[in-house]
Image (cartoon, grey):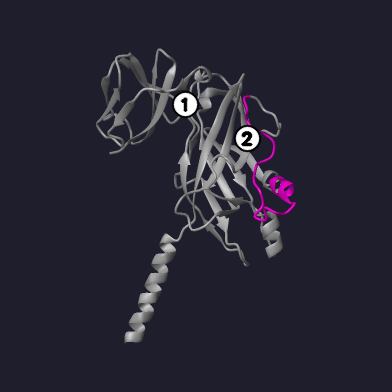
Amino acid sequence: MKKLLLLLSLGSLFIVNNLFAQVTGHVSIENVSVTGTDVFFDVYLNETAGSTGPIYLGNADFYIFYDPAAFNNPLVSVELDPNPPNGLQGGYCSFLPTNTGGTNGDFCRFLYNTNQSTTFVGNNQIAINLNGPSPGTQTAFLDNMALIDTQLSTHRLGTYKITGYNNTPFNLIWDTSMGFKTQVFTLEDTAPFFSSEVVLTHTDSPLIGTSSNEETAITFGYSVFPNPTNQYLTIEVEGTQESEFRLFDVNGRLLNTGLFTGRTVLETAALPSGAYFLKLSNAENEFAVEKVIVTR
């Protein structure tokens, strides 16, 4: 009986350790830029603190909501121009192979670029689907598998372009639902190179609009609470300068706007559950965007 209890205890410990021994990562939309009727953005991936190891990037699906009303006949593509506008990197992705001392870096980047596709899903989603390498040997793994570590703004999947922008404000927002959800898989670093899902967190784009290139990050203090909320949302801004709030849904549609000084309260009881974006700005063209969650 004691031996059985010991085996059960060891088995339970193994299960618990596996529940908590997870590779964790973060995906972000960065460097959003508007040039004429083209919207450019970068997609980055990194390992996060507390992860059990780096991400050896296998298959992945990246689903991003956008507002179709902000575009006229949109097209989405990977931007392969090595010198796109406004300081974006462009060209192939910036991944390096696990064998960082090897000479296969260019092939690794080429491999991950040629094995991804960009399409629209329905009328409000961008899909970036990646077929990662399937190494058969340890050498192939070391030379071809991209190693994603904790460095920020380093591991770039690519620069992407959506054409046909008509200057309507909108956001690029990660889809984390149960349907077409954003998911990334990592491979074990020894044969047979089993695959497992990475536990992800996400950073959406800031609000994209006609004046975004002229605005600067907000420099005065503010607070938005409670967040999540279900009845009321309080906005407080330091100082005596008049501020403007604008509340958008996830498709970039303006739901509420107004001017205030110091403090204002918004009713949220009539809003459906979900994510919203609150933009604060002032006469100095300083701005901030907060993601607001409404719950029921």
Q: Position of residue 26 (x, y in %)?
A: 49, 45
Tag 2 residue: 159
Q: Given the image, on which type of amino acid does mark 1 rest? A: Leu
Q: Position of residue 118 (x, y in %)?
A: 63, 39
What secondary structure is the magenta-colored segment mainly? loop
Instruction: For mark 1, give the secondary structure.
Output: loop
Direction from residue 181 to residue 148 in the image, left or right: right
Q: Residue at x 39, y 30 (%)?
A: 290
Lower position in the chain sequence, tag 2 or tag 1 = 2
Tag 1 residue: 207
Direction from residue 232 to residue 287 in the image, left or right: right
Q: How many marks?
A: 2
Neighbour class for label 2 at 10 Å: few (<14), some, many (≥20)?
Answer: many
Q: Given the image, on which type of amino acid does mark 2 rest? A: Thr
Q: Are marks 2 and 1 in contact (CB under 8 Å)?
A: no
Q: Position of residue 46 (x, y in %)?
A: 53, 46
Would residue 106 be counted in the magenta stretch? yes
Magenta residue span: 86-110
Asked which quadrant contains residue 154, the reply is top right
**As rendered, which of 195 and 154 lies closer to the eye?**
154
Q: CA gap, disc 2 to disc 1?
A: 18 Å
Asked which quadrant contains residue 86, the reply is top right
Neighbour class for label 1 at 10 Å: few (<14), some, many (≥20)?
Answer: some
Q: Residue at x 56, y 31 (%)?
A: 31
Location of the N terminus by quadrant is bottom left
**As rendered, which of 26 and 219 lies closer to the eye?**
219
Q: Residue at x 33, y 81 (%)?
A: 5
> Of the numbered discs in the image, which one, if any, rests on residue 114?
none
Location of the C terminus by quadrant is top left
Instruction: For mark 2, give the secondary structure.
Output: strand
Would residue 91 be counted in the magenta stretch? yes
